[in-house]
Amino acid sequence: MGTYRKRGRYYTSTGYSEEFDGYSEVSPEQPEYAAYQEEAADYQPEYAAYQEEAADYQPEYYQEQYEDYGAEYQDARQTAVYDNYSPQSYRYHDYSSQQLRQPRWHADYSDRQRASAYPYPRYGRVQETQEVPQQEEGNHERAARRPEPDGEELQRRREARRHRRIREEKRRRRRKRLIIALSVRLACMLTALFIVISLFRLLFFGSPVRRKVRVEAGTELDVKDFLKKEKVKGEFVTDISKVRLDHVGEQEIVLEVKGKKRKSRLIVEDTKAPKADPVPAVIDVDGKLKAKELVDNIEDATDVKCSFKKKPDLSKKGSTSAVVILTDEGGNTAEVEADIEVIIDKEAPVIDGVAPLTGFIGEPISYKSTITVTDNCVRDMDVTVDNSKVDTKTAGTYDVFYTAVDRAGNKAEASTVITIKEKPQNYVTPEEVLEEADEVLKEITKKGMTKKEKAKAIYEWARMNIGYVNKSEKDSWTNGAHQGFTEKSGDCFVFFATAKALLTQAGIPNLDVVKSDTSHSSHYWSLIDCGDGWYHFDATPRMGGGDDFFMKTDAQILKYSKNHRNSHIFDQSLYPATPTEESTVK
């Protein structure tokens, strides 16, 4: 037996068939009717909560049966009956073949509430014990008499369930799309706000100095490279002369702009590949050859490393070649192929530039400043100096010995003398003289000039700017050069010393040559090497014409000396021999 409420009235039934025997209508005039309505209203919230909990415990199969049988139950004739206010009449009855299971706590709670609220406990309890077995028995009978659904009804139910699932999926997708749309809109708003704030800071509070500046290695820095606007003025606080632009890396640069010191990051890059000229090499069998010996005139703003693409085979006599890979600090590479001649080396190296030396007591002496060593196999060779017999604390003349050994074991030796004397008064150091020479070279030389072109410019400057007077201090070549730079006058020693300072600072190898026969007069001049051998260089002008002494051979200078009272006679054993023909280097 079950009780339910519809349109403000309560109905109780004991059977599910169309015959409603046992139904009793409750008359509004009965005094129990008002109490029945009040108690039913009190139990409505509890009944709703029970329905929600029952839905969680109800399997889907029984829920579907409830919907189907519920429709049939709604079509049955219903009559308001009086069931003695039994607590069972307020319970929810499932019209399926299986009775709905209720949680134990709910049943206990409901019994206690009804027992405390119902004014006629004895009558209600007796009626409940009598009615419940009949209701359970009637439910089973109705379940047995209920016809099974046909195929169309099952199909309809399946379609109904499918449509419900589709509607739920559509609602879920609509919620998901809504959440995504709101998230995208919020992200766009935040991005727009960030952009507006960034632009505002950039326009009104941004620094006029760039945070990072990238320059190519070897270029000169300009303060405009660090400023964002051309109209803004600034100056370097960092000493730019100490900033290394010949190496790849990062450095911090400080500038003063608008009265404030601001920092920028200088990034030196090298994006240009190096260049070099191949150099043919001659090597002894099984000799050791380095990759850098096969290239020359390397052009790059940063340091370049040389390596073999494939190590050449030097175990047999004959001709071969090798490819040298040039790699700069920026990772740029270039390949140069050079020829190699493998021989059996029996030729000793040649030591050039050996000439008499002069030094002062207590002063350091450079023994190798004019020494060069050449070999048929090794391009750059070192020379060993034996100065064990030289006493730099005592005035006098001492012997100096030079030794060079190539990779094949061939040995060359040479010797000279050095004169140690007292330092003259008002002595001018070489550093001071070379600084004076730099000022002159800035005026007479240009970038890209060859050694021979620089030597010619020095030769002409000395002849045009120094006047000849028969007076000079010959104790120190630095004092003589200082006289030539400051007084612009002097004898042959001043011409020689001034040219020596200019040649040395220009990077042109030079040797001091002294006239050997001083019975008539003394004379000084130089030997220079511009790349194709040693040649005589004498900037001192002479009377009578024919005094052009720029890069002359031994034969040419001795011929002039013979016709002018041995003006240029010298001990040829102390100096390297010149080529027999005139210089052809550019």
Image (cartoon, rainbow, N blue to C red):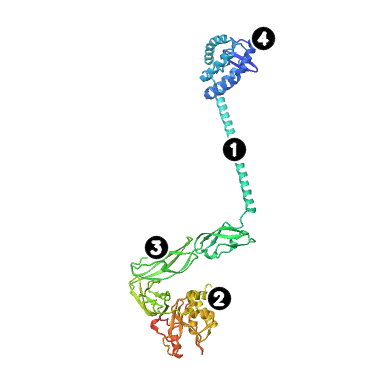
Residue, disc 4: 29
Name which residue lies at 55% across and 23% down: 53
Query: How many angstroms separate mark 3 from mark 4 (CA)?
Result: 120 Å
The answer for how far apart the CA atoms under marks 2 and 4 are is: 135 Å
Viewer-side residue, 260 vs 318: 260
Spatial CA distance of label 2 from label 1 is 78 Å
Task: Please state which of the two labelled residues, at mark 2 or mark 4, is closer to the viewer.
Answer: 2
User: The disc labelled 1 sits on which kind of residue?
Assistant: Ile
Evaluate whether residue 120 shows in this view: yes
- Residue 443: image quadrant is bottom right
Distance in Å between CA atoms under marks 4 and 1: 58 Å
The answer to whether 268 is drawn above or below residue 86 in the figure is: below
* Residue bearing mark 3: 310
If you read the primary sequence from the N terminus, does the residue marked by circle 2 or circle 1 appear first?
1
Q: Mark 3 or mark 2: which comes first in sequence?
A: 3
Q: Position of residue 32 (x, y in %)?
A: 63, 10
Task: Count neighbours of disc 3 (C-alpha within 10 A) and say few if under 14, some if 14 to 19, many if 20 or more.
Answer: few
Image check: 238 left or right of 415? Answer: right
Q: Nearer the viewer, mark 2 or mark 1?
A: 2
Provide the residue designation for mark 1.
179
Asked if 12 appears above or below 202 in the picture, the reply is: above
